[in-house]
Image (tube, grey):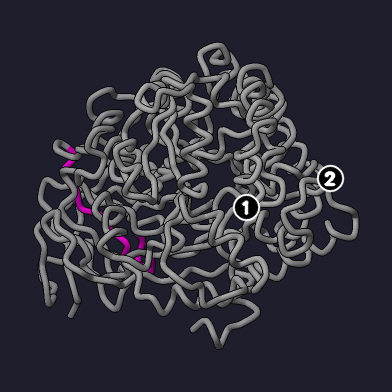
Amino acid sequence: MFDVILKSGHVFDGSGNPWTKLDIGIKDGKIASLGDLSEGQAIQIIDCKGMAVSPGFIDPHVHSDLLCTKPEIHKIKALQGVTTELFGQDGISVAPVSEETKPLWQKQLNGLNGDIGEWPWNSVDEYLTFLENSKMIGNAAYLVPHGAVRTLVMGFEGRTATAEEMEKMRELIEEGMRQGAVGISTGLVYPPNVFSDKEELIEICKGAAKYDGCFVVHIRNESIHSLTALDEVIDVARQSGVRLHISHFKVIGQSNRHKYKTALEKMDEARREGIEITFDQYPYSAASTVFHAILPPWVHSGGTEEMLARLKNPEDRKRISDDFKNNEDYENWVLSCGWENIIVTSVQTDANKCLVGRNMLEIAEIRKKTPEEAAFDILIEEKGSVTMIIHWGYEEDVLLGMSHPLQMVGSDGIFGGKPHPRLSGTFPRVLGKFVREKGALTLEEAIRKMASFPAQLMRLKDRGFIKEGYQADIVVFDQEKIAECGTFAEPLLEPAGIREVFINGKLTVHNGEYIGTRAGQVIRSACHLKMNPVESV
């Protein structure tokens, strides 16, 4: 007796092979049988005739680290077929912390990850245990964030680390890996990661490589100096032996578009050298991140409070304004994309809610100030907790990356306010617009990029494929109707065409509706499982 039988679907197993027609028997959270189950019995039988049946989608770049505990908010991920997410991105996340650094990170991350109140954890293990006790909708794995580790060792100081400090950071990375993380992350445009040099990155990556972890990185520059920035992290992988994964790969700004093809060629060349490199990409030509990322790195030294103090200082405001216009040495969103392409998407105060959805030229006109002055004032009023969307490029470049064999699909979804529609529509957009309408990918290849490929990155042993004995993370969708519905004007509209979603064998989305199931699991690394076999049963 099975718990569920999915009958007569077109099964895409996640490998990239063409679909095959068979039944799937689910029992005790796992795929128990594949084949002709017409004589089988089950508590529930679901007819999937004419439907595509695939492994659950695995999102390798998210910011659900806190709001995964809020099902009424987080359900948008399951509604687009996502069953597993990789937390701890960009080197700026919630563990490990200490009682001293915790308040700093709560302020720093409020605009990015949201606010759930007090954090009852310090270590990676304690955070993952908190998630295990939170009854999440979907599955979660974690990356040790470089910034959190750096802050434990040397605070938010705007300087390079000493050899002793690098060694302490590497030891903390190793500890996080043993506690269950699957790799490490950094965002080399975000404080305090931006203050690190290549030697520091090599040292901390040795800690991840020791346990076969991956290095997931938002490179130091995605515009003018994007090729140099890519060379930097490739060399980090070369010297440390770590597996390298580039986050939300793109090249920003019209004048830099020609570098995109060269960057892809650099990745291919690194592969031929024997360096394991991959990248994720969202299917939009607009980015989204914290608003204070527009500021030059020196403004961030010391953390949020010191940043806000500088924004109140007339001399510092003038220096920042000059940097916006002339400084090419950092990721200068203003110089690369223009104020007209920078849009405020979330704020904390009711007084500024009227700004959400407007670009900075419009806001400057409303406030009768320059865009620079308006930006400074908004950050001060919101205590830094603001997010933005930036229109950076062209769909042709998105297609170039999407068709590359090293690409996997990732949303980089951020909650709050009027978010980027990638939060609700990334995976249906690929399957609807880019597979069905544009023919940029086959359906088989797109599913591979959404399931087995990210599972390989995360070293997941029993997810990413439809195979007997694997966890029953499964999506049933209509390949003729699947589509994103969200837009930049209405980003939270739920996608169409996804009929059923199973997470660990539990029906979570039924007839396109989230039904309240919370069957998610924390997925800890293989090294944790080896070291803690009893705890992990």
Percent position of residue 255, x then y: 56, 11
Percent position of residue 169, x then y: 77, 61
Figure quadrant of residue 520: bottom left
Mark 1 belongs to which amino acid?
Answer: Glu
Taking the image as shown, residue 467 lies to the left or right of residue 161, namely left
Residue 172 appearing in the image? yes
- Seen at 29% across and 45% down, the residue is 424
- Seen at 71% across and 59% down, the residue is 151
First along the sequence among labels 2 and 1: 2
Mark 2 belongs to which amino acid?
Answer: Glu
Q: Is residue 468 magenta?
A: yes
According to the image, label 2 marks what residue? 199
Q: Residue farthest to the bottom? A: 534
Residue 58 drawn above or below residue 369: below
Residue 224 drawn above or below residue 422: above
Figure quadrant of residue 486: top left
- Looking at the picture, tell me which residue is in the foreground, 345 or 214: 345
Quadrant location of the N terminus in the rendered image: bottom left
According to the image, label 1 marks what residue? 305
How many C-alpha atoms fall within 10 Å of the one at disc 2: few (<14), some, or many (≥20)?
some
> Considering the numbered disc 1 on the image, is that residue within a helix, a strand or a loop?
helix
Q: Is residue 489 magenta?
A: no
- Seen at 29% across and 78% down, the residue is 28
Figure quadrant of residue 95: bottom right
Q: Residue farthest to the right? A: 163
Q: Which residues are magenta?
A: 467-479
> Considering the numbered disc 2 on the image, is that residue within a helix, a strand or a loop?
helix
